[in-house]
Image: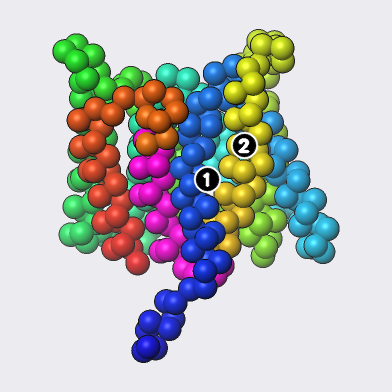
């Protein structure tokens, strides 16, 4: 075995953690759809992230992590607003109208927007031919989803919902780029818990402003929605984020970022198996285009 292969020979724990990221994050789209069926979206997401964040924060404090500073809380608030309130909260709200598989496909275009934002930024990292090919494929896939038709006169996806998902993906990319330079604790798990806490609190404020508390009736919550909420809280947030951070720490960002082109496929299959979402020829073609675009962009960025 040469030196290069030794450097890339990761232990089984890394591959198990990566597999959990694939399965857990890929399944959260279906979980969100089931949860918002009887729980208002921002109330559902806000309580989910607040509970997950508090549990993880207490765990980190119990392990002896240093108490975060005011400036670190400020950064966590900004990131929580962008990633959790606007991006994740928007996804939760839109999934009331858009199938989970299509949602995952459009959210999976985040690497595309990161490339574009970096190109338009101060450093102006100009995309190469392979990245441009990925951008074009991704945009074609999005256009096909938005304007494709299941039947004559019936669009594949709600245009407003699709536009909203494109916006949430853009905001997620914007928040991710900000998080790279933001002042945060050295512990990635502690920083994640802070972002979830602040994002959850802000989501609950949005829920209050939208009147979701007055429309929420606990006795009307279905068993399936409640089970989905528990899954999203304990597994989707805590296990998924923890596994992702573990992969980042033990391998490299390129390997961890492969979730972006695996999760949409898993979400489409789960939506078909458990939610009765249709697998149309247009959906297959759009899936191939978008996943192919993310692969080109992600591998090139390596």
Does the residue at mark 2 contact the one at mark 1 (Cβ under 8 Å)? no
- In the rendered image, residue 262 lying in the magenta stretch gets the answer yes
- In the rendered image, residue 6 lying in the magenta stretch gets the answer no
Does residue 133 appear in the picture of this structure? yes
Residue 171 relative to residue 80: left or right? left
Residue 33 relative to residue 167: left or right? right
Mark 2 — residue? 231
Q: Residue furthest front?
A: 273
The percent coordinates of residue 23 (x first, y second) are 48, 47
| Sequence order check, earlier mark of 2 and 1 | 1
The Cα atoms of the two marked residues, 2 and 1, are separated by 9 Å
Residue 49 vs residue 288, the one in the foreground: 288
Question: What kind of element bears circle 1?
Answer: helix
269 relative to 153, above or below:
below
The percent coordinates of residue 244 (x first, y second) are 54, 56
* Residue extent of the magenta highlight: 249-268
The percent coordinates of residue 22 (x first, y second) are 46, 50
- Give neighbour class at mark 2: few <14, some 14-19, many 20+ (Cα, 10 Å): many
Does residue 174 appear in the picture of this structure? no
């Amino acid at each position: 075995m040469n030196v290069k292969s030794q450097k890339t020979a990761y232990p089984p724990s890394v591959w198990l953690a990566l597999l959990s990221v694939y399965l857990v994050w890929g399944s959260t789209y279906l979980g969100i759809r089931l949860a918002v069926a009887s729980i208002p979206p921002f109330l559902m997401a806000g309580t989910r992230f607040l509970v997950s964040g508090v549990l993880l924060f207490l765990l980190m404090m119990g392990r002896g992590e240093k108490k975060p500073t005011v400036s670190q809380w400020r950064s966590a608030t900004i990131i929580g607003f962008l990633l959790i309130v606007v991006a994740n909260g928007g996804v939760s709200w839109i999934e009331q109208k858009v199938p989970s598989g299509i949602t995952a496909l459009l959210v999976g275009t985040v690497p595309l927007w990161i490339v574009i934002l970096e190109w338009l930024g101060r450093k102006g990292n100009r995309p190469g031919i392979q990245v441009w090919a990925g951008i074009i494929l991704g945009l074609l896939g999005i256009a096909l989803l938005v304007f494709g038709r299941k039947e004559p006169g019936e669009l594949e996806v709600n245009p407003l919902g699709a536009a909203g998902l494109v916006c949430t993906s853009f905001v997620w990319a914007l928040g991710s780029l900000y998080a790279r330079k933001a002042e945060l604790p050295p512990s990635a798990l502690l920083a994640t818990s802070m972002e979830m806490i602040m994002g959850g609190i802000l989501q609950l404020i949005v829920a209050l402003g939208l009147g979701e508390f007055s429309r929420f009736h606990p006795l009307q919550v279905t068993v399936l929605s409640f089970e989905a909420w528990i899954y999203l809280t304990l597994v989707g947030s805590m296990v998924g984020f923890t596994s992702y951070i573990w992969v980042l720490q033990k391998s490299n960002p390129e390997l961890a970022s492969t979730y972006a082109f695996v999760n949409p496929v898993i979400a489409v299959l789960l939506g078909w198996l458990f939610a009765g979402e249709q697998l149309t020829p247009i959906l297959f073609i759009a899936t191939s285009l978008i996943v192919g675009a993310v692969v080109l962009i992600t591998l090139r960025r390596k």
